[in-house]
Image (cartoon, grey):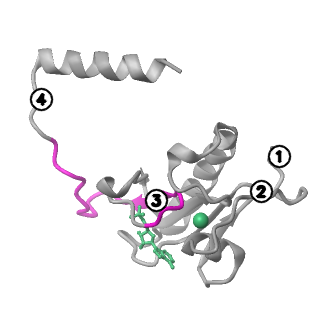
Amino acid sequence: MSADSSSAAVAHPFDPGCIFCRIIKGEIPCFRVYEDDEFFGFLDISPVTPGHVLLLPKGHYPSVLDMPESVGTALLRGIARLGNATMQTMNAQGFNLLQNTHEAAGQTVFHAHWHIIPRVHGDGFTPWPQQENPGKERMQSIADAIHALSVSD
Ligand code: AMP
Ligand code: ZN
């Protein structure tokens, strides 16, 4: 993988029925904000705050769980470049990085993507409410179960 966006084109999986694949290919218009070998960025058509952008792999991977680990470096590079550029453009003081995985979590377009939502102090955008802590015993059993599954191959 190269960090140089001018290097030779890489073949990416493509789904002709996917709106984001078609945007990347130029078949459907978008307000493009970013592009390198592996990732593409454009303005979200229904912004949460002005300057809300989407960052997505050029390859069609339905969710983040389907993406190859090898694009991890390019993903971090895209987040840093696009996050900084978006904050600067929008005079924002921060941004929320949001990623919805599967329908139950609010994913509506099944081509993995990250939302970068610029934020300013006092903008009134309220994240979701937190729930009561379920207690020490339940917390420990949840932690143990997740740990066992996440460290096994
Ligand atoms: P998610 O709910 O995480 O799957 O996010 C999908 C996002 O894609 C939503 O925020 C939509 O507003 C955005 N979206 C859908 N179609 C388009 C489009 N044609 N151009 C730009 N953004 C889009
Ligand atoms: Zn796609």
Task: Kindly report the distance in space between the C-alpha atoms of the residues bearing marks 2 and 1.
Answer: 7 Å
Mark 2 vs 4: CB contact within 8 A: no
Q: Secondary structure at mark 2?
A: loop
Residue 32 sits in which quadrant?
bottom right
Ligand 1, image quadrant it occupies: bottom left
The residues bearing labels 2 and 4 have C-alpha atoms spaced at a distance of 43 Å
Q: Which residue is more in the foreground, 79 or 92?
A: 79
Q: In x, y percent, where is residue 127?
A: 25, 53
Disc marking residue 37: 2
- State the quadrant of the N terminus: top right
Disc 3 + disc 1, Cβ < 8 Å: no
Q: Find disc 1 in the rendering and name its residue.
A: 2
Q: Amino acid at mark 1?
A: Ser
Q: Which mark is residue 133?
A: 4
Q: Position of residue 90 (x, y in %)?
A: 48, 68
The local crowd at label 4, few if under 14, some if 14 to 19, many if 20 or more residues have their Cα within 10 Å, is few
Camera-side residue of 134 and 117 = 134
Q: Secondary structure at mark 3?
A: strand
Relative side of 89 to 50, left or right: right
Q: Main secondary structure of the magenta part?
A: loop
Residue type, numbered disc 2: Asp
Which stretch did the figure color magenta? Answer: 109-130
Q: Which residue sits at x=41%, y=51%?
A: 101
